[in-house]
Image (cartoon, rainbow, N blue to C red):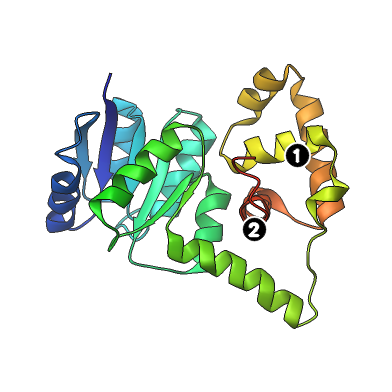
Amino acid sequence: MPIRLVIADDHTVVRTGIRALLSEESDFVVVGEAGDGVEALELAEELRPDVLLLDISLPHLSGIKVTQALTERRLGVKVVIVTVHEDAALLAAALRAGAVGYLVKRSSAEAHAEAIRTVMRGEVYLSPSLRHAVEGNAQRMAEMGRHVPAPPTVLTPKECHVLRLLAQGSSYDQIAAALDMSLSTIEDHRSNLMDKLGLYGRAELTRYALQYGLLNS
């Protein structure tokens, strides 16, 4: 069964270009296009695509707001932000809102396809330039004497497993089912992770997992 996609961008030329980039992939099918944030949210609710390729700067409702709304409504739509902005702060905001991918528009057709397939495997995808930014930011923090999170060795194997699933974009329900635990136990593990590592929220946990190569460990 092909992966069902919705493309949301306020420029028709961009939407057409992304569709053209993906048109030769036999396992993809574009089921809808949206020109603003409200339309993107409505289409996602109506069509329930597997992946929403979403511009971060949309009229009426930003890509971040659309992502937050989809996360809150638990529709099962995987959001990949597609943007010109190579900005670590925007990346953090997107991850915090619930996005599982962050793709720079200038990326190749192969990168677009890789991003879609990566998030469909339950993993997080970041454009390579953003991965370097995450790693570079950690290095700058260390050089400036600012807080650097503890290494993974302080975590138990179970905490590492929970961290990996959180960073890959799994919901609390999905993690609880995968590990045969209650939701409250998963929430306790999340709290322990943040306490041990000195981090706050899923976005920082995801950056940490990327920094230490824990997503596929």
Q: Which residue is mark 1?
A: 160
Which element type, helix, strand or loop, lies under badge 2?
A: helix
Q: Quadrant of the C terminus?
A: top right
Q: Residue furthest front?
A: 217
**Residue nearer the viewer, 215 or 13:** 215
Q: Is residue 17 left or right of residue 73?
A: left
Is residue 167 something that shows in the picture?
yes
Where is residue 51 shown, x and y percent of the image? 35, 36
Q: How far is disc 1 from disc 2 in space, using C-alphas?
A: 14 Å
> Residue 195: in sight, yes or no?
no
- The dot on residue 211 is 2
Q: Quadrant of the N terminus?
A: top left
Q: Sequence-wise, which precedes: disc 1 or disc 2?
A: 1
Residue farthest to the bottom? 144
The answer to whether residue 71 is left or right of residue 215 is left
Please tell me which residue is depicted at 65% across the width and 20% down the height of the picture. Answer: 178
Label 1 crowding class (10 Å Cα cut-off): few <14, some 14-19, many 20+?
A: many
Amino acid at dot 2? Gln
- The amino acid sitting under disc 1 is Cys
Q: Residue shown at 61%/43% (left/top)?
A: 215
Q: Position of residue 143 (x, y in %)?
A: 74, 81
